[in-house]
Image (tube, rainbow, N blue to C red):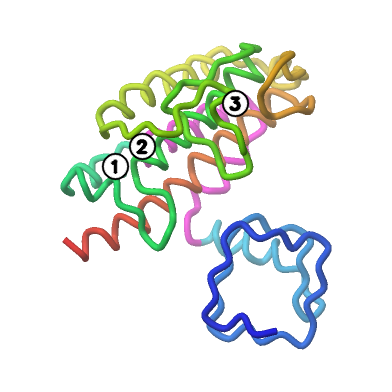
Amino acid sequence: MDFSHARLHAPNFEGATISDAWLLNADVSGGIEGLRINGVEVAPLVEAELDRRSPDRAKLRATDPAGIAEAWAIIEEVWRTTVERARALPEPALHERVDGEWSFVETLRHLIMATDKWLSHMVLQIARPYHPLGLAGSFLEDPESLGLDAAADPSLDEVLAVRRGRMDAVAETIGGLTPHELERRCDPPAGLGHPTETCSVLTCLQVILREEWEHAQYANRDLAILEAAT
């Protein structure tokens, strides 16, 4: 089977066995857990190297209120500089997809959806918190059922206005955290929505921090390509 020069978007290799493979110049990104290459588990090595490159990244795994607050301050600063960088480009470029990935504006819309899911839906227990400009991953086959507008094409400023409200809500929640609150278990409200399993406030906030960080890395990677093109 020849996958040379192939592009696989969102493939699921859970439980797969790949033998006698050639991975010369291959580029793999995504959730990696339990993956072994030539008998060596890969994820811990990748995590350690990513932390070495960006020491602030390790702070996103904080488990106490003060640490979570520090991590959110890092996220705020990362996105402040990222948006400032994006504004130096023409608006059409911010709606342009690079190598088939989400555009800059679409990335911000996805983070609106992520906050609606993990903060508003789970932590704040709002049954239908989804803003129409939110953008879900391809796993959600019927986004309209959550009130999302799949045909929307908002401007950067329109998206940033919604996004600011979501980020302020995260900051307000973090500002009121206690160790006991971080341990609180959140059951998904009845009705449509995601996630569908009980998890702690800490888990929800760590997912938000991870989503914010990773998508900022993707955004800056693509902004560099757009800058070179313009």
Q: Mark 3 highlights which residue?
A: 117
Determine whether, in the image, residue 93 is placed left or right of residue 29. Answer: left
What main secondary structure does the magenta stretch of the protein show? helix
Determine whether, in the image, residue 83 is placed left or right of residue 43. Answer: left
Residue 44 or residue 124, whichever sits in front? 124
Classify mark 2: residues with Cα within 10 Å, few (<14), some (14-19) or many (20+).
few
Verify CB contact (< 8 Å) between mark 1 and mark 2: yes
How far, Cα to Cα, is label 3 from label 1? Answer: 25 Å
In the drawing, what numbered circle is on residue 77?
2
Q: Secondary structure at mark 2?
A: helix
Residue 138 lies, with reference to residue 174, above or below; the image says below
In the rendered image, residue 68, in percent from the top left (x then y), is placed at 57, 30
In the rendered image, residue 100, in percent from the top left (x then y), is placed at 43, 59
Q: Find the magenta span and give its range.
A: 53-79
* Rendering quarter of residue 137: top right
Quadrant of the rendering where the N terminus is positioned:
bottom right
Quadrant of the rendering where the C terminus is positioned:
bottom left
Residue 131 or residue 218, whichever sits in front? 131
In the rendered image, residue 208, in percent from the top left (x then y), is placed at 56, 33
Q: Secondary structure at mark 1?
A: helix
Q: Mark 1 highlights which residue?
A: 81
Q: Is residue 66 magenta?
A: yes
Q: Which one is earlier in the sequence, the residue at label 3 or at label 1?
A: 1
Three-letter amino acid code of the residue under disc 3? Lys
Residue 23 or residue 74, whichever sits in front? 23
In the rendered image, residue 116, in percent from the top left (x then y), is placed at 54, 23
Three-letter amino acid code of the residue under disc 1? Thr
Residue 73 lies, with reference to residue 60, above or below; the image says above
Three-letter amino acid code of the residue under disc 2? Glu
How far, Cα to Cα, is label 3 from label 2? Answer: 23 Å
